Image (spheres, grey):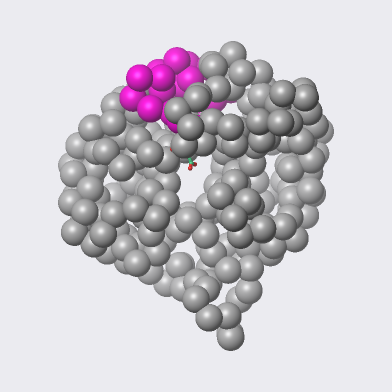
Amino acid sequence: MSRKKIVAGNWKMNTNLNEAIDLINILKTTTKQFSSIEKIIFPPFTFLNTAAEVLKSETSFFVGAQNCSEHAKGAFTGEISAEMLNSIACKFVLVGHSERRTYFKETNEQLVSKIQHAFKNNLHVIFCFGEVLEERKSEKHFDIVKQQLENVLKNFSEKDLDKIYLAYEPVWAIGTGETATPQQAQEMHAYIRKVIGQIFSTKAAENISILYGGSCNAQNAAELFSCADVDGGLIGGASLKADDFCKIIASF
Ligand code: PEP
């Protein structure tokens, strides 16, 4: 699969049912003109079915889940399986978001298992990774990102990459208002492509789509998206405001 322009919105644990319906409907209408850009929203689980219904006839606007279980089914109270997500026309799942790694202590083994279950159930994955502030300050950020990629992706084939988008999200930039500079984003995205080239092939490195995430907003998206190796954004806070999300999509 070749590189695409993508804007994804991670709503996290925000909105109630009415707010979610309003936001989805506004986004459906206002983003119609951007048919060459793939749009994906990640509402909370409870509103996924509604979102998938509202967007079911859309060809460039999809729904994803913020997480899925590393198990197929069974006695795992409170968990949601990849099979359940597939059954409600959900197309994507986020795996490896820093909030899941930090607050829920998700390990590489769990991330691998989640991706395997996602693939078995026809879901595409946005695989998130990125360094924390200390690691950047001590100039370990390239090594950390390489490890995060290798530890998980070595379990998959080059063909599997057709179903994966990468999201580089420096943890120090998530929800902090401190965005990576376009130079920092470009430098890391070029490095990520190099690592993908080493694990798989030059062709795989050229073809994979890599999103930037971390305080990306309507003001800074254009500069970030103009970087040669940035294929779009994974947006948190700014994806909850229809106007801002639309402006970000229009930034390409
Ligand atoms: C995120 O949670 O993936 C994210 C990028 O959040 P924010 O845009 O709010 O920094």
Quadrant in the rendering for residue 187:
top right
Seen as rendered, the residue at the extreme bottom is 75
Query: Does the segment drawn in magenta span residue 229?
Result: yes
Asked whether, in this view, residue 194 is left or right of residue 67, the answer is right
Quadrant location of the N terminus? top right
Magenta segment range? Answer: 214-231
Query: Does the segment drawn in magenta span residue 50?
Result: no
Q: Nearer the viewer, residue 1 or 212?
A: 212
Magenta: main secondary structure: loop
Tell me what residue is drawn at x 58 percent, y 85 percent.
74
Judge whether 251 appears above or below 69 on screen.
above
Q: Position of residue 194 (x, y in %)?
A: 75, 27
Q: Nearer the viewer, residue 151 or 199?
A: 151
Tell me what residue is drawn at x 64 percent, y 52 percent.
101
Quadrant location of the C terminus? top left
Q: Position of residue 219 (x, y in %)?
A: 35, 19
